[in-house]
Every structure is written in C-alpha cells, then in structure tokens.
Image (cartoon, coloured by chain):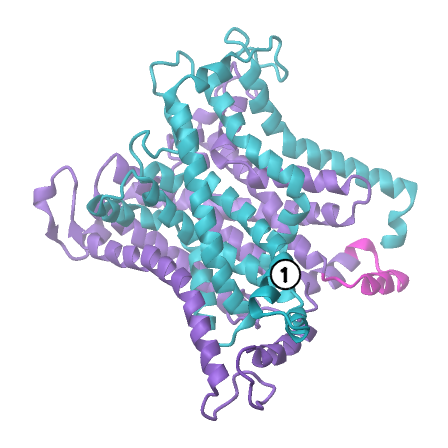
Chain colours: A cyan, B purple
Amino acid sequence: MAAADTTAAAKWRWGLLDVVVVVFALVPVLWIASLSFKTTATLTDGNFIPREWTLENYRTIFSTSQFVRALGNSIGIALIATVVAVVLGTMAAYAVARLDFPGKKALVGVSLLIAMFPQVSLVSPLFEIERSLGLFDTWPGLILPYITFALPLAIYTLSAFFKQIPWDLEKAAKMDGATSGQAFRRVIAPLAAPGVFTTAILVFIFCWNDFLFAISLTSTERSRTVPVALSFFTGESQFEDPTGAICAAAVVITIPIILFVLFFQRRIVSGLTSGAVKG
Amino acid sequence: MRTETETETGTAAERSGRTGAVPAPRRGRTGRAGRAPLSEGKRAERRLGWLLCAPAALVMVAVTAYPILYSVWLSLQRFDLKFPDEREFVGLANYVTVLTNDYWWTAFGVTMLITVVTVAVELVLGMGLAVVMHRTIVGRGLVRTSALIPYGIVTVVAAFSWRYAWTPGTGYLATLFGEGAPLTERASALAIIMLAEIWKTTPFMALLLMAGLALVPEDLLKAASMDGATAWQRFTRVMLPVMKPAILVALLFRTLDAFRVFDNIFVLTAGANETSSVSMLAYNNLMRGLNLGIGSTMSVLIFLTVAVIAFVFVKLFGTAAPGSTDEGGRR
C-alpha cells in the first residue's frame, strides 16, 4: 500500500478525500459564522454567503449583560476547573505511572467508571444536594462536577505521557550532584510540561463544552455559562429575532476552540490517542 | 507508543528501583511480589502513592458515588418540589410509575435507536477518516486540524448551526427534501439529530481508531501485498485483527457517550414530536415537572442501563476492554 501511495493517481485520490473531509468538517462552522455576519434583512434569505455584511450582531451581544456575564462565567469556571483538575490529575497520574502501591488498580477502575458514568444520573441528586448546601447557581457548584468528570481524562492522558518520560535522567542528574528538587525542576518538569499542557487543553475543551450540568445547576446570570445563555436568548424579549445574536455568541465561544486546534493540533491528537489506547 | 510490552518490564524494574531518598535493600525484580516485610523505601512509596491519589479519588467519589446513592434514596420517595409537604416513603412505586409509562419507553427507544445508528455509522466513517488521516501525504496537517474542529466545538453551537441550516426560510438545507419543516416531523427530526451527533463525534472515533491503526506493522502490510492480497483483504485480514482492541475501546466509549445524548436534542427539537432521549426526559422531569422522586428514579434507571451496557461489553470482549486491569488492555 505504501508503495502505491506515491503514484500520482493515488495522490489525487487521497487529495480528493482530504477535500471531502475538510469541507464536511468546516461547513457547519462557516454557516453559523456566515449567519452571524448577516444583516437582519438578509438573515432569512437562505444564502450560504451573506449578501450584506454587518458586525451589528456582535455589537448587540457585547452590549448585553446576559452575554458578557455568561462569557465571564464560562471563562472563569472552565479555567478554575482546568487548573484544579490538572493539578489533582498530575499527582494521581504520577503515582499511577511511577509508584507501586495497593489500590492503584482501584483508582484506575474508578476513573474508568466515571468516564462512562451517565452524567444525567447526577442531575437530580446534585440539584437537591447543591440546593441544600447553598452551592446551587454558584461557580463552585459547576466547578465541582467539571473537575470530577475531567479527572479520568486527565489521569489517563497524563499517566500515558508520564510513562514515556525517561525517568533515568532524574537518577543521572542526582548522580551528577543535583538535589531532588533540582532534578525535578531542571530535568523532569521540562519533560513533563508538554503532557500537562496538552491535558490542560483537553480538560478545558471539556469544561467549555458542557451544557447539561450548566443548564441544570444554574438559574441566573450569576453562574450561567455561554452555552446555556445561548439557549435562553430565544425567549428574551430584548431581541426581536435572536438568530443573529445567537450566532454571533456561538462564534465568539468557538474562537478559543479554533485557536487551540490551529496551534496545538499535533498535541491534541497525541493526547487523545495516547490516553485512549492506554486506557 | 504501543512498544509498551517491552518497556513495561523495564518500568517495573525501574519502579522498584525508584526511591531516591532511602538506599533500597536488594529486592526481587517483580515489584510487588515481595511477601517479606516491607522495606522502609517500599512503605514510603506506598504512602506517597496514596497521598498523591487521595485528592483525586476523594473528589471523584464524593461527586458521583454519594449523589447516586442519594438518588437511590430519593427514588424511593414521593418527592415533588411543588408539594414539598407531601414527601413520603413509597417504596418502588416510582419505578412502577416510570416503567409503565409510555413516555419513558418512547424516550428509551429513541435513545437506543440514536445510539445504535450513530455508533454504527461513526464506526464506518471513523474508520475511513482514520485511514485518511493516517495515510494521506498532502495536507495531512490540514485534514487533522479540520477533523479536530467538530471534536472541539461546543455541541450547542454546532446544534444551532444545524438547526438554522434546516429551518425553512433561513437555512441552506431546508428545501433539500422539498417543502416542509424537517425539524417538526419525527422521522426527519430524528435523522437530523443523528446527523448532528455523527458530525460531532466521528472525529473522536477516528482518533481512537487511528491510535490502533498506528500499531499495524507496515512490513506486514507490505508482505501481504507481495503475496497478492487485495486492499480489502489487507484491511480485513491484517489491519482489523491488530486494531481489534482499539476498535472495542472506541465502541465502548462512543456507545456510552451516545446513550447520554442531550445537547443536540435540546437545541434541535427540545424533545418535541417524541424525539426526547432518556436524558432529555429526566431533565424535563426535574426542571419542568420539579419532581425529584420520579427524576431520581429515571437517574437510577439510566445508570443501571449504562452499567448493563458496559458490563456486556467487558464480558463479551474480556480483557480487551480498557481498565479491566492496568496492563491487561495491551496485547
């Protein structure tokens, strides 16, 4: 097969397939972007490319607290959850990858169970528990479940990365007279950093994406995230036709994802594949 | 990355040799075989292991195990937030109510249908995409980058894009199959929901499969090719057997994930015209019905269903399933 690939005909075939994939992947994204740039008058013309371009929709959403607050909530909640999950995940993954202790398999098993857990099963009980603890409709009320469901992802991905680190270097550094701290800072940390960073991206995408918890465990602008705010634009009277605003908001929260994918494609692919297979 | 089989023994030796602080007394190569009293270093290693895992384990158990048990408790009660005073223990009455209810079974059927169809289609498309991403020479980065966009994009955003695409008057796809509003008819609405799901998750499936594809030895393919095997034979006889573990992992994860379908339905149809999934139904029961007893009953039933699916997968495929043991999954 490899030999055949080099012929011109094969190159064309693969190239054509590439085009199909790219078009298939991008059309829905381009469509919502196109809608967000359409004027109210041309919004319903059904054209894929806007006939008249405008930034009005973006001006509208950034002038409403509904969207701006939600954006702040989304960013804050996703960042905090990511940091906590990655720190806890790094600790656990180090132990899984490097140490021998009873209960290791139990930990791996528990994380696997949670990766498969139907999140909707938690909605009713968490709703009630968070109401009685005063966590309902607060940042921590969302951050906690996000951490929980991000941890299996973090532990798998990180332990896969950690298993690939040449730990002998640490010993070598110590033999050359480095202290444990120095060996960690100068040798191990730089080697582990890419894995930790990749995991952080994956976890952030997960938190950024969530809808079910966000819509069930919030009730006001205080902690509503953008995906939820989007679905509420519809009923608000302040927008005559919310389509343009929804699309503009949708584009805004897609930008970070596009940036991650553009700049860290390789890392994301390796993170997802290594974590999954090692699982 | 699957050279693990060799390195595994290496890391085991390394692991037992890893102590740093305490000069380790001589110890067998097999890390945990030591029946002899634990050395100081060994005990320190255990303590460190527990200490490092404790926070993660605590959070995971506290946020899932406790609520699910609480949910079992709630499911045995009559507990309607609109009538909080009438809360009482009713045994299995809620289960009878749910399991004899048509809405539940309709939603269950819809969820099953979506799960089976999307996972089957995704497996085929995902395999194709995996091969394209793995094999292609020109524009490999571009293909991989584009494929990651559906994976990364917020599901709600993608769902809105599909919704507007199919909305009459607004969308470019609305008149594709003649007049009418596809999202307001059950069959077409379900098809659109499945399309949206497939678009979003095929790349994930493909990435998992690509990891398996990377394990197929190039020499083996070449040898098969020399012996006159056709492309299809190479695929079924050489690639598929090697990829089996990766395929099973991908199937298991996607099946359970597909069973949770919620976001797309919420945005696309809001469950109208009998397009609710079980997740949608449980959510509506809680938020619109404010009935915690019934909602929790559904939570427990969904949890049990997922547990059964996972159990069947693991039973059928044995150690090939992930996590059965730390090492067992690799072959």
Does the image show residue B123? no
The N terminus of chain B appears in which quarter of the rendering?
bottom right
Check if residue B121 falls in the magenta segment: no
Q: Which residue is mark 1?
A: A186
Residue drawn at (92%, 45%), measured in percent from left and top?
A7
User: Identity of the amino acid at label 1?
Assistant: Arg
Under tag 1, what secondary structure?
helix
Comparing A225 with A117, the one in front is A225
Counting from the top left corner in percent of width and height, residue B305 is at 38, 56
Task: Answer above or below: position of B6 versus B163.
Answer: below
For the image, the number of numbered tags is 1
Quadrant in the rendering for residue B27: bottom right
Image mark 1: chain: A
Does the image show residue B81? yes
Task: Answer above or below: position of A185 versus B142.
Answer: below
Q: Main secondary structure of the magenta part?
A: helix
Task: Answer above or below: position of B329 versus B292.
Answer: below
Counting from the top left corner in percent of width and height, residue A270 is at 65, 53
Quadrant in the rendering for residue A251: top right
Comparing B45 with A273, the one in front is B45
Residue drawn at (52%, 54%), measured in percent from left and top?
B253
The C terminus of chain B appears in which quarter of the rendering?
bottom right
Task: Answer above or below: position of A236 versus A118.
Answer: above
> In this picture, which residue range is highlighted in magenta?
B215-233
Residue drawn at (42%, 27%), measured in percent from left and top?
A230
Counting from the top left corner in percent of width and height, residue B131 is at 73, 49
